[in-house]
Image (cartoon, rainbow, N blue to C red):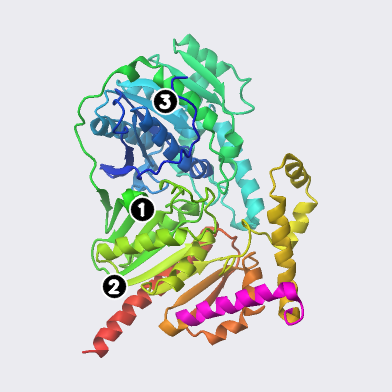
Amino acid sequence: MKQTAMSSEDGKEHSASQPTAFGLHIGLFAPADSDVPKSDVAVLLLNPWGIEEMCTRRFYRILAERFAKIGVASLRFDYPGTVNSLDDTSAERGLSAWSEVIGKAASELKMLSGARNVIFVGQGIGASLALMRAHCEPSLAAIALLAPVLKGRVYLRELSLFSRLIDDGLGIKPELRDSAPGSIAGLRMPRAVAEDVKAIDLNGLQIANQPPVFIAERPGLEGDTTFRDRLEAAGCQLRVIPFAGYDALVSNPLNQDIPDALIDELIDWLQALPQHRGRSALPAKKPGATASVRVDAIRETSVRFGPADRLYGILCEPTDNSSGVTAVILTTAYDHTAGWARSSVELARALAKVGVASLRFDSAGVGDSPPVVARRKQVLYDEAQIADVGIARDYIDGLGRSQRTILIGRCSGAYVAFRSTVDDPRWDACLIVNPVAFRWRFKGLPKTLKAYLRNALDLETVRRLWAGDVDLGAVTKNISMRLVDRMAGSLSPVFAPAKPLTQLTRQVHRDFHALASRGTPLSIIYTEGDEGQEMFRVNFGDAGEKLSAYPNVQLHLLSAADHNLTPLPAREKLIELAKRQALSLGDARDAKRAANG
């Protein structure tokens, strides 16, 4: 190989990619590193769909960083009606709208990079679009197809099966599940797109030109040689490898394993292309510090901020009738700026429509924000994220958007939001959804005792234990803590192991007293039966009766929902509660002004 293998997270701190706007679309441009010759090829990264997109967000960022090291610039973006795209209506035209945006993105990439040749790199449905779009791009030098969708009907059936498995795992009731074609985990594929996907058959595609093609074949599909044979018959130069690590990348957004071997193979293939050895011209366009698009009364601005511009986020603002309130919407360790099932996008835009601005951003190591050296790779319930929230607060202060502020988070984002509000009195309110704890003492993310017992009897758990894929020490520690939780209330005066827990509960109550003394409104939302309630009951009683000591706190219980608020009615309820909480801050400010004359 021309480049030695290196790990996906190389120990070097990076800036977030540079925002750029083309038409109604926002892209993230990663220029070639300044200390290497600039290649005459640039890479356009094309997203997969749904959970696969969520799982590959960090993978695509790492790919962009690796390309930059060999002098290759890249651009990534979201299709209409997906992820952070503000252009939802054009998705009604189906895959033709997605294909048109690919063409616009390719033009933008060439202007930003100065490269005369473009390489399409796509995964899943993005790989299929790359091949289908090939005849429309005269500057196309090569195509990389990562686990391409060969037959749309088969793909939609697989999505339906995977969707049922996810819904089963989340405990979503059958009547609340979305069974529309292409829908998965609360994400609904635009109807016209699903119709067009159904018609995809790459084995029947007429290939007009003959670009070099890199194929990473999905496990289980290596035996299907028809597609490869057609490409070879069309005159394409093929490099075919198995997609080692595919399942570990896309099966669980909570813990993705980056396929380093695949990245090395892809880099090696790219460097062997004759166009790579050419040198790019001067760019015709420079990316700005920010990039904005506007639809109706909403303006969204893609931004970088913090030390070395290492954090990436999106400002969503009303273009008129501002309430003077700004929300900061936190991610978890895996659902990037868009949120699970686009929940952060939906929330931000609903708030903007009632005059509330927001910033949603990726913490370091999540989504499009690069990691910080020496921090844990798995940032779930990581205290280090509190520092990123402080940086976000400084950023909105600098924008003059800090008259009234509210922090909003779910799961680990809820924990970070609560801890940040306690530690930093600049925040005026906090809304948290399904926090597992208010002070952290577990190792990793704990399960309930019932879940531990159920998993202990599961053959898959036995297999993972035998393979060394389970941190037995962490499981043992968390089970011990759960057992102590059950006994702590009555035995703490005489049962020594329970004393740390009661001390922790006292610390939690000190935190709540601190917020109450400041008059900081705190909304706590739990879905009924959520595992986070186990620790909540330890702190505040089975019915939350000890919350009565804190008049600033409101507790809300949502029925018919899972931990992630996957069903649409649950997300809509959250939006209404968030609007009410945010607008009350503006009302309180106006009332105070009126009282002061």
Q: Residue at x 63, y 47 (%)?
A: 164
Question: In what element is the residue under mark 2?
Answer: loop
Question: In the rendered structure, which segment of residues is drawn in magenta?
Answer: 492-515
Q: Nearer the viewer, residue 335 or 388?
A: 388
Magenta stretch containing residue 508, yes or no? yes
Please name the residue shown 25% across and 84% down the image: 593
Disc 3 or 1, which lies upstream in sequence?
3
Residue 446 is left or right of residue 300, and the answer is: right
| Kind of residue indicated by mark 3 | Met
> Is tag 3's residue or tag 2's residue first in the polypeptide sequence?
3
Which residue does the numbered mark 2 point to in the structure image?
403
**Type of secondary structure dominating the magenta stretch:** helix
**Of the pair 475 and 165, the residue shown nearer to us:** 475
Mark 3 to mark 2 CA distance (whole Å): 50 Å
Q: Nearer the viewer, residue 109 or 289?
A: 289
* Residue 569 visible within the image: no
Image location (x, y in percent) of residue 140: 34, 21
Please name the amino acid that badge 1 sits on. Answer: Gly
Q: Which residue is mark 1?
A: 313
How packed mark 2 is, by other alpha carbons closer than 10 Å (few <14, some 14-19, many 20 or more), is: some
- Identify the image quadrant of residue 386: bottom left
